[in-house]
Image (tube, rainbow, N blue to C red):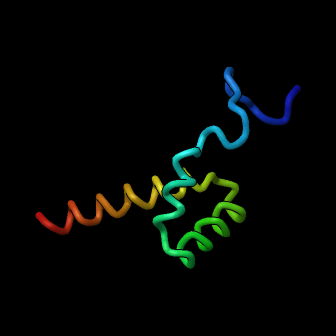
Amino acid sequence: MPSRDYPDIRKARGTRSKEMVLLSARVETPLWDYVRTLALETRKSKQDIIAEALMLHRTAHEGGGK
């Protein structure tokens, strides 16, 4: 019995976050270092961390403006 559940279609490492290379060039270095550290600590992808942060930012600003 496998120790993890894998998706039916597996993607090669690095193919999921090609856009992150471009994004990292636009993010300040201290923030990018924080995201990288958080990714190592939480075992989440950098892409997932940034997407979650953007959604939280959006909901905070939509809720406060009404």
Considering every residue shown, the one lying at the far top of the view is: 8
State the image quarter where residue 54 is shown.
bottom left
What residue is rendered at 34% in x and 63% in y? 57
| Vertical relation: 21 (above or below) 64 | above
| Residue 61, x across and y down, in percent | 24, 65
Answer left or right for 1 relative to 42: right
In this picture, residue 55 sits left or right of residue 19 = left
Callout count? 0
Q: Residue furthest left?
A: 66
Q: Which residue is drawn at 74% across and 31% down?
A: 5
Q: Nearer the viewer, residue 3 or 37?
A: 37
> Outermost residue toward the bottom?
30
Up-down: is 1 above or below 13?
above
Residue drawn at x 67%, y 22% as measured from the top left: 9
Of 13 and 54, the residue lying toward us: 13
Q: The C terminus appears in which quarter of the rendering?
A: bottom left
Q: Is residue 18 left or right of residue 52?
A: right
Report which quarter residue 36 is drawn in.
bottom right
Residue 56 % position (x, y): 37, 60
Q: Position of residue 7 (x, y in %)?
A: 68, 27
Q: Is residue 15 left or right of residue 63?
A: right
- Quadrant of the rendering where the N terminus is positioned: top right
